[in-house]
Image (cartoon, helix red, strand yellow):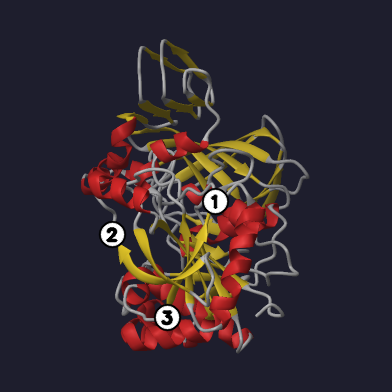
Amino acid sequence: MHNTRVAPVILSGGVGSRLWPLSREAYPKQLIALNGSHTLLQETAVRVADRNRFSAPIVICSEEQRFLIAAQLREAGIAAAEILLEPVGRNTAPAAAVAALRALQRDPEAVILLLPADHRIPDTQAFLSAVDRAGDAAAAGKLVTFGIEPTGPETGYGYIRRGAAFDGRNDVHHVDRFVEKPDLGRARDYAADGRHVWNSGMFLCRADCMVEELETHAPEVLAAAREAVAAGRTDLEFFRLHGPSLEASPSISIDHAVMEKTGRAAVVSADLDWSDVGSWSALWETCHRDNEGNAFAGDVMTVDTRNSYIRSDGALTAVVGADDMVVVTTADAVLVASRDRAQEVKSVVDRLKQEGRSEFKNHTQVYRPWGAYRTLQTGDRFQVKLITVNPGARLSLQRHYHRAEHWVVVNGTALVTRDEEEILVRENESIYLPLGCAHRLANPGKLPLNLIEVQSGPYLQEDDIVRIDDDFARLADRV
């Protein structure tokens, strides 16, 4: 295997609900720079950027996030081998199956490295060392997972109990068993006994071995993945998996589908400063903290506050007399929680979904392949947005049947198509788009274009868009 470049597979299907309100379903935590200039997705891609060791990565993500992910990879200087689009989320086992099949199509001796996109591993050399140490076991047909040496009694992670040493090694073991997330008492025992490690959710194996074990232990998953790949199609820079085929797969993790059942599981012990950043308290632990134990981000002020995580993505956020708290402010939501109950934020997200509120899914700023828009005000039969169009980009040629629009250019120059007309609209100029007209907005300049859009009409939702032509092949998309 030392002569074979490993094929990284970056799994970017998670929604990060425990980091709400910063992480939203349409813009999850792996796409956010939580603690530095790079997002977690970018950090993961850069971690496997050495092309002497690794081939270009395969990325698996939702259709909704495809343009964001492609843009972030370009920004990080990473060219993906391909970006596979899941029309529906089915957990990590179908994703692993699809990745293994696609990797084998490229190389019948492919070795794949499955990596969640939302993990933080600041020491890249320690990570690469762990991958190297897993190589022999993977070449021998083992499905190797990476076990993190516990730093304490963590109840938010699953555990792996190490069995006999593999090939006389003291850092690679056969897996004795996988253990679900424990209560605090058992977590203390696991952290102290020297046999248990945290289950990182990262895996290294030959792709053909993964397929064999899926065939044995999860044949329905593999059959659905085969059909999803065979009936898939190329769409711009993406490969769109066949939706009905993937929907037929059970929704199950690779741990439950294969790793807990196979006799070929091995674990490499890795002493990494690793976190899956699964909650606000976990993020607090990864951050630089002041002498009072506080971690800050954004416009924040504190008085007599200790051991807290306080973040603002907008308004000044002041906290007085709080200990062990999480306070997070975004443009449309505020979270206040005890740090030791930060895992329960997911229940807020579940309730938002049940009540039909949009805050679980979208921020006020929504990203599109051409730029972004931010909702500024919504009222009875009107809506006001700030629209930003990237240099050289343009929106689809479209019409609306339920609303008219008025555009006012704040800065930059807009090239507007209105039915048969093409009109340049400059800074501090405006244009009216009557209901039903075919129109398009383009930025012909070298700087971002910003304009205010005022919509008026009886129905103002984004699905009142009929696309006539689109640079991003979204004619069938509803938004």
The answer, for residue 331, to whether it is visible in the render is yes
Position above or below: 307 against 382: above
Q: Residue at x 47, y 28 (%)?
A: 311
**Disc 2 and disc 3 in contact, CB within 8 angstroms:** no
Q: Position of residue 40 (x, y in %)?
A: 55, 49
- Residue under pointer 3: 264
- Residue under pointer 1: 272
Name the one closer to the observer, 213 or 436: 213
Q: Position of residue 292 (x, y in %)?
A: 47, 18
Dot 2, crowdedness within 10 Å: few (<14), some or many (≥20)?
Answer: few
Position above or below: 416 against 207: above
Q: Earlier in the sequence, mark 3 or mark 1?
A: 3
Q: Nearer the viewer, mark 2 or mark 3?
A: 3
Report the quarter where the N terminus lies. bottom right
Q: Earlier in the sequence, mark 2 or mark 1?
A: 2
Cα distance, mark 3 to mark 1? Answer: 24 Å
Q: Helix, strand or loop at disc 2? A: loop
Cα distance, mark 2 to mark 1? Answer: 21 Å
- Residue under pointer 2: 180
- Answer with the quarter of the image where residue 251 lies: bottom left
Q: Helix, strand or loop at disc 1? A: loop
Q: How many marks?
A: 3
Report the quarter where the C terminus lies. bottom left
Cα distance, mark 2 to mark 3? Answer: 19 Å
* Amino acid found under the numbered disc labelled 1: Leu
Position above or below: 471 against 93: above
Q: Residue at x 46, y 36 (%)?
A: 285
* Amino acid found under the numbered disc labelled 2: Glu
